[in-house]
Image: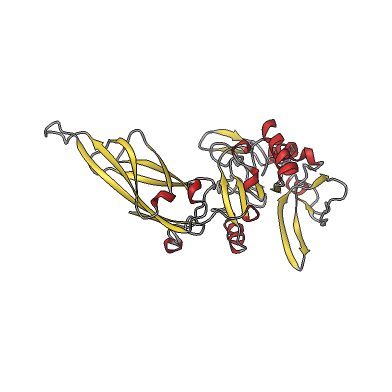
């Protein structure tokens, strides 16, 4: 088997084949499955070995694996980064990952354990680190989806309310990902909180449909990043309305329990904490509709609205329908 993380690997290795690796980027995480044909159970012997080949020194490889391979299979997670000494390199890095698996001896034979080695080849494009203005960080850490709880979909028009797509640039935001790539941007996925990245490396932080709250330390850190380090903050807020959340609860036949949303389409109260230092606040309203901007039609599906914005800022005003009232059984017209 081989991980071809170059353009030649598309479309099978999409999205990793669409964006080269570079020093300072968030780790690329690849998941593989160890299939054990020797027995129903087994375990990895020793460490997972990385054997660099041509330009393999431009890849730093870390691996994690299942403690027990059972039944017949277990996971192998590989984390790829580019070391600082390759920050100006433009090469294809190659190497191999080796993992040894041991299983109990076959029943009725001697006591010698069964041993087998699996090899995975990796080939990745490494490029010089892009300028800050071309690097965007996507916050996936504060995104929560079904399961483990009832987190509703962003669009209330869908009667299947469970938000299981993950709100990720490689799933339901694939179109946005492709547009950003077409315009020359590099998109990285943040898998930790806001204390885990250096704002000096990124032009913008995108917070898209966050369902989690933000710790005070995170709010303070982003305030410093924006005011002192020039980080741009892009927020897609979704909706949050307590009455609507109660309205869309349902009785689940599997668990025999009433399921009430743990938040709205997004956690607007948490976003208001994040936006408070800039004099921005979002409402509990839910709106939908279509408006024209720059000659293009913009379709709004289940969105919040602004109730506070700093003087001198630029705002876009549109006449939309009050979807909260519609959902709760009120008027379908009106709203702004």
Viewer-proximal residue among 69 and 116: 116
User: In x, y percent, where is residue 70?
Assistant: 32, 36
Coloring basis for residues: secondary structure
User: In x, y percent, where is residue 85?
Assistant: 48, 48
Is residue 286 left or right of 75 when viewed as pictured?
right
Is residue 196 left or right of 82 when viewed as pictured?
right
User: In x, y percent, where is residue 104?
Assistant: 21, 33
Viewer-proximal residue among 310 and 175: 310
Q: Quadrant of the N terminus?
A: bottom left
Toward the left, the furthest residue is: 109
- At x 50%, y 37%, the residue is 254
Q: Quadrant of residue 215?
A: top right
Viewer-proximal residue among 205 and 151: 205
Q: Quadrant of residue 181?
A: bottom right
Is residue 70 in sight in this rendering? no
- At x 60%, y 34%, the residue is 258
């Amino acid at each position: 088997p081989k991980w071809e993380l170059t353009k030649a690997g598309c479309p099978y290795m999409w999205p990793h084949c669409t964006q080269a690796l570079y020093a300072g980027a968030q780790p690329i995480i690849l998941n593989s499955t160890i299939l054990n044909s020797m027995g129903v159970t087994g375990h990895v012997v020793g460490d997972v070995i990385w054997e660099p080949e041509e330009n393999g020194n431009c890849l730093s490889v870390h691996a994690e694996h299942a403690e027990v391979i059972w039944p017949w299979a277990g996971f192998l997670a590989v984390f790829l980064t580019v070391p600082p000494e390759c920050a100006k390199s433009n090469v294809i890095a190659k190497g191999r990952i080796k993992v040894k698996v041991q299983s109990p001896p076959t029943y009725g034979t001697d006591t010698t354990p069964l041993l087998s080695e699996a090899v995975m080849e990796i080939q990745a494009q490494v490029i010089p680190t892009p300028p800050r203005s071309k690097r965007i960080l996507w916050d996936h850490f504060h995104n929560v989806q079904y399961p483990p709880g009832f987190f509703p979909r962003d669009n209330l028009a869908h009667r299947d309310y469970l938000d299981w797509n993950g709100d990720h640039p490689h799933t339901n935001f694939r179109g946005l990902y492709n547009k950003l790539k077409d315009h020359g941007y590099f998109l990285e996925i943040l898998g930790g909180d806001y204390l885990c990245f250096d704002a000096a490396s990124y032009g913008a932080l995108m917070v898209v449909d966050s369902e989690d709250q933000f710790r005070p330390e995170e709010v303070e850190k982003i305030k410093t990043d924006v005011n002192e380090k020039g980080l741009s903050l892009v927020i897609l807020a979704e909706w949050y309305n307590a009455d609507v959340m109660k309205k869309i609860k349902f009785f689940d036949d599997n668990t025999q329990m009433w399921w009430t949303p743990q938040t709205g389409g997004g956690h607007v109260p948490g976003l208001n904490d994040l936006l408070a230092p800039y004099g921005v606040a979002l409402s509990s309203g839910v709106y939908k509709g279509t408006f024209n901007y720059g000659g293009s039609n913009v379709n709004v599906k289940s969105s919040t609205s602004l109730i506070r914005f700093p003087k001198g800022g630029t705002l876009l005003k549109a006449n939309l329908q009050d979807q909260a009232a519609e959902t709760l059984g009120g008027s379908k017209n009106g709203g702004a």
